[in-house]
Structure formats: structure tokens, C-alpha cells
Image: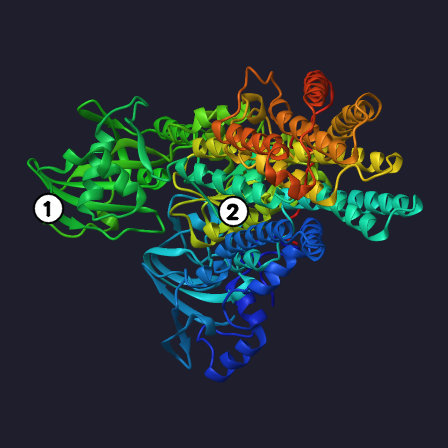
Amino acid sequence: MTVDPARPPVAAPFWTESVEVVLAKLGASRDGLKGLDATERLRQHGANSDVVGKRTGPVRAIARRLLEPLSLILLGAGIVSMATGDAIGGSIIVVILAFSVLLDTYQERQAVHAAEILRQSVAISATVRRDGAFVQVSIDTVVPGDIVRVQAGDIIPADGLILDSSAFTANEAALTGEPYPVEKKPGVVTATSAAEASDALFRGAIAQTGCATMLVVGTGADTMFGSAAAALATAEGPSPFERDLRGYGLLTTRLTLALVVIVLAASIFLGRPLLQSLLFAVALAVGLTPELLPMITTVTLSRGAMRMAKRKVIVKRLASIHDLGAMTILCTDKTGTLTSAQISLARSIAPSGADGPEPARLGAIAAALGGGQGALDLALVAASAKAVEGWTLAAQGVFDFDRRLGSVLAQGSNGPVLILKGAPEAVLAACGQGRSGSGATPLDPEARDAVVRQVLLLAGQGLRAIAIASRPWVGAIHAPETEDETDLVYEGLCAFADPPKATAHAAVTRLKAAGIQLKILSGDDPVVVGRLAGLVGLATRKTLSGADIARLSDDALAVQVHNVHTFGRLAPDQKARLVRALQAGGAVVGYLGDGINDAPALKLADIGLSVEGAASVAQASADMILLDSDLGVVADGVEEGRRTFANILKYVRMGASSNFGNMLSMAAASLFLPFLPMLPTQILLNNLLYDISEIGIPFDGVRPEAVARPQVWDMRALIRFAAVMGPLSSAFDLLTFAGLSLVFHAAPAEYRTAWFLETMATQILVIFIIRTNGRPWADLPRPALAISSLGALLVALALPFTPAGHWFGFVAPPIEVVAGLGLVTIAYLVSAELLKTFLFNHMPRKHGRGLRRRRAR
């Protein structure tokens, strides 16, 4: 029998069936299993542990990255360069590539221990009944049909049904998102949601009070916890950034091969020496290759990671920085992210319906003297700590889980007082009067109905209520019993809340302004979730529950998910299903969660975010860890992610347009000039100096509009930009060719030198124009970029006039040629600025929508 309460069931979940029916299906009994039977079941069902994903070794991880199109072309260019005599240039390409691959591999290896962390986060032993006696066994050997005993403090080792319990509650916050302890007792329930299964226990929950015995129904992967853990073992697909980088590599490869074949064929057709033609074609290939792209990408992302660390965000996967900036929808859990997960007393309400201190005062006395450590007791004591002064415990009654109430006999200055607190309906049943000022009046049916309406009203406001009652104690002191808990005076209600964080509303507003939709995906009550959404400024007209989602087809869910912003009572796989539905609609989805129930969604989302102090499985599934569980930190990270990607895009845009334009010019010139327009070594030097000029890009500033909306790597826009700016560069190159040939009648060496100077001046100076959407003089570059660019330009311009210029075949050109080159450069820069403005203002821009990927299959 395979049981998975985490998934929308096709049959009734096990907690809706009686213990006898489940025992019959399992072939077990209340007396437990025999040792031989348990051994056979262990062989059939496997160990009660999580599936550990197959680890990729470092060699295979490096090989996978080297087989990327861009890596292959860079590696090939480096090897060919070294083989044809340019050992320095080829070595630089290979070293840069190796540095990038190794650093990227190291970053991703940080999460390989995720499954092991998860395995160690649960109990290592369990108490089971074998051969008629309870014994300690390894948790791995627990099997379906076992009878397990759990008590306060234990971590539940498997999924199962309650056989019997005594004052037993479990903390399931990490599994369901419910912040309050949940009472567990025998008895069939009809709820289809695991969060409402009061007769079932789930692996990974924590026993908070009392003790219980349970019948194990599901182990290992057939548990809610196991389903979450299985997400860690699934293989990841490429991220949006990695996919686009691969697409750019394929585009560069195709363009390079096509241009090399054409130029090589044309050179041979024109009768030029084969070796010279081959070297020229190789130089063209290297010139088209963005050698520094891996380094620029890695350095920019690494610098972004360091800047994000200062903003309390730890980056586990470098590419996720881009993905965070591209995010269009953020799904977040409620408990611990939008709320503080710290229950507090919100109101103390007298029987009249007005606020009054007496219910909270008496509740705090009962909680403190009764030694309660539950969330509600701690909140009562924290709110009225001084109320306990002068009171001592005379006797204490046993908490009645059937009636859901408990009592203490407190000794005060006016004698002993019996204080009762618990579920409103149970407390009201023990009351005959209601407090009215300093006296009491009969509690008639109308007054009781008013209390019930008050409780429902509080629930609609997201508040949980308990009732308080008291009466003076008469007679000998003894532990209160059921017959003593009668004819009490109803003192009022204490209402509790898991309030939103003070910063939540402002953070939601920031995310909205940044073009990011927010959706709350919680395991808590849908009414509470809807109320919280209103408090944090998230407009919502409808909240879907897990039961609603289970009834929807994938197509219907894909429609609903875009119109609904709040979801409650969700199972782990339903959260993942919602993420998948959003991705199917073209959204780039982020997920912020801190519980075991969030792991599948964290793994599947385009960008998974967890927090410090979250469950190990949540941290292991995430791409980033927030050191402060605050949506404001996410908003900061989004800005940094967009800033980082904007700088990477600068290099890609510059390189694509400049390299394409220059190589197009060289290819065209080689077809009508009787000599090579530039020697292979000069091409390689040109490319090297240009790359050096761009080293400062990772440290450049970014205009506000670049971080205002989600941004992705739009390949079509990149091609359009290169297709316009590249030919513009070629047009001025052809103008230079015409002037050198027809006006100055330059010799080959002088021709090559002049064109080298013009090429270096135009493609480096245009960096200051292309790097910004605004006017270059109004948006100056940061010092690092200015120094690297102008430094490389100075070297390029001075080289032909130095003795070292002869090593590369340069000669010092006449002053009139230099003046002419200056005029061409100025005309080109003016034209580039005008054309750039047209491109940025009139060409459509692509934001986050339309980009989709699946990280887990």
C-alpha cells in the first residue's frame, strides 16, 4: 500500500478510514508485528528514509559545463590560437574559461549535502511494539503495520493513525504552516486535508504534550515528509540565466562558423596563400568570441553575491542572482515570513463585548501556576506577567482533552479561587453566570449566543479565542475534578494572533512597485490567510483552500491561479502545483518558505528563498538564504539582482555589436583589398585590448530604470541591437577604408595601423555611450570602468608609436591620417548616440514575462 497524504488523493486518504479497516489493509494488529514479519516488510517497502539523489562528481560537473556551446567555442579558440603561434592569447582564453568553470562548479557543490542534512534532521530511533513488547529500533527499520509509541519531545518517525492518546498535542508548523499546537486523538475524520486530520500523525512533526500510540501507515518516501525530501533528489534543469547563456553561445557559434567558412572560401578563391588565409579565418573566429564573458559573468555575479551578503542575503547559486532580478511573481509562506510566528495576546474581552483586563489577568495566573509551555500559555504570561505576583498554586486539575479545558486552584490574598480556561463552548457549559462589573448575572441563552457570535467574529479577524471562568473555592483543598468545574462565572475571552511583521506592509508595497506580484501560499486556515493578506496590503477577493485545488484540473488551476492571490490549507505538493501553474503561464516564479512543507515548491521555483533558522530541508532546497526573515530583504535582493544583470547585459550588448561590426568590416575588406586588412596577430591584440577595456563593467553603476522592472536576457533585442549598431560601426570602417585607399593612398602597413587605431578608438569610446540609456555626460561611469577603458585605449593609441609596435607590424601613421581618424571617430560616436536613443526608446523591451523553465522534473 502506497500512501502519500501530501498529494491530491485519488482515493480517500488513510485518516478518513477506521483503524480496523486500515489494520486489515496492512495485515497488522493492535498487538504489533512479529520480528520476522517486520523484516519481510522492510524488504518489501524499503528503509524508512529519504531518497538520496545521485551525486554528480566534480569531473562530470566540470565536463558538463565545458560541453556548453560557449565553452566549446572558447576552448577551441584558445587551442587553435596556441597552435598557430599565439601562445599568450590562447593561454589567457583557456585560463579565464577554467577559472569560470571551477568557480561555478564550487558554488553549486555547496548544496550537494542537502539530502544528508534532511536525513539527520529527524529522529534516529523509535519505540515500536515487536513480538508483544515495546523496544527501541532504528528509525530506518520502522515499517507499515508497526505500532509506535511517542511522547512529548519526540519527533514523529512515520505517518500513521492514532490508536490512543493522553493529553497529546503535536506541533505541525513546519509541515502545515499552522502555528498553534494541534490536538491529536483517535476517531475517524472526513477532512481531505492533512492539516485537519486530527486522528493522524505525520513524520517530522514534534510531539508537544502528552503521549500516544500510533499505527504506522506510510514510511520513507510514502510520507508527507518523504515527499518533501524527494524534491531534493530530483535533477535540476538549467536556470533562466544558464539557458539564455547557452542560447547566446549557440548563436555565437553559428555566426562564427558561417563567417569563417565564407572568409576562408573567399580568400582561397582570390588566390591568397592557404596558411595565411587559415590564420586570418582563425583570427576572425577568435575576434568574434567573447573571451571575457565567463570572467565578466562570474566576477559580476560574485560581486553581486558579496553586495547581497551586506544586505543579509547569502547566495548559494550564482546564477540565481539574475533569476531573482527577473522574478515577476513571489509566492511566500505566511508563518515566519509575513508573520513573526510568535503568538501574542491581541485582546482581552469582557462578557459585555468590550475590552477589559480581567480575562487576561486570570488567564495569566492559570497559565503561570499550571506550568503551561504552550504558545497560548506563554502569550498570556508575557502579556500579564505582574498578574501572577501574590498567587500560589494550591492544586491543579488534569487537562481534559475531550472537553478541551483545564483548571487550577490558585491561592490568593482573598482565599483560593478556581480558574478554568479552554475552548469557549466547553467553558460556557460549565458556567451559570456571567461577570457584570463587580458582580454577576445569570448567563441566559441570549448571552451564550452573544459569546458564540463574538468567537466567530474574532475567527473572521484571524484571531483564536479561549474562554476564562472562575469561582471562589469552598471546602478542603484538593485537585479539581470534573464535578468541581460547575456553576462558574464566565469572565470573558482572550483572543490570540500571529500578527504580521511591522515591516510586511511596506515590503509588499515595494515589491508591487518593482513589478512583482505577491501570492500567499500557506498551510494555515484560509480565513486567517485572507485576513492577513488584507493587513499587509494585498488586495484579495477570494481564497482557495487545498480541498478546492484538489478538485481543479491543471487547466482550470492555471486560470484561477492568476486571479487568486491567497491560498490556505495547502499540502506540500499543492504548493508545488501552484508554482508549476504560474510557470506554465509564463511567469518567473520565486518562492519564500521556511518549513518542510515548502521544500517541493522551493525546489521547483525559478528562485528558491529560505531564511536563517528555517528547517534544514527548506534551506537545502533554496538558492538563497535570508539572514533576516523579512520581505524587505527580498526587495533589496531584487534590486541587487537586477543591478548585477544590467552590468552583465552591458558586456553582452557591447561585445555582440562591436565584435560583429568589426569582424563584418574585416570580412568585407578582405574581399576587395589586395592584402589582408589586418594581420591575425593584430586582430588578436585588438580583441584582447578591447576585452581589457571592459574589465571594469562589474563595478559600474546602473540607472534607476534598469532596476525598476523585472529584466531578462532578451535574445531578440540583443540581435536587433547588434544588427543595427554593428553595421553602423562597419559603415564608418568602410568610410575609413575609402579614405585610406582613395585620399591617403596608404601602404599595407600604414593601412593596417590606421584601421587598428580607428577600431580601438571607436569600439572603446562607444562603451561610454552604450553602457547607459541616458546621455553619457549625465551618467558618468564608475572609476573602475573609466580606468580600464581609457587605460586600454591609451595603450592601443600609443603602441604604434613605440618600438614595440614593430613586433605587431605597426608603423607610425602621418599626422594628417591621425587627424582624419579623429574626425571619423567623432562622427561615429555622435551617430551611435543618436541611434542608441532611437533603439532604447522605440524598440520593445522584454521583461520577466514569457520566460519560463522547470528546475525539477
The image quadrant where one finds the N terminus is bottom right
Comparing 408 with 93, the one in front is: 93
User: Which residue is located at x 58 percent, y 76 percent?
Assistant: 44
Provide the residue designation for mark 1: 475
Q: Residue at x 70, y 53 (%)?
A: 72
Q: Amino acid at mark 2?
A: Asp
> Could one spot residue 691 in this view of the protein?
no
Q: Would residue 112 appear left or right of 476 to someone viewing this image? A: right
Query: Up-down: is 59 above or below 92?
Result: below
Mark 1 or mark 2, earlier in chain: 1
Quadrant location of residue 461? top left
Q: Nearer the viewer, residue 839 or 751?
A: 751
The spot of residue 136 in percent (x, y) is 36, 75
- Seen at 48% across and 60% down, the residue is 113
The residue closer to the viewer here, 417 or 721, is 721
Question: Residue at 59% across / 35% down in the picture?
Answer: 802
Please, what secondary structure does the residue beneath circle 2 have?
loop
Marks 1/2: CA–CA distance: 65 Å
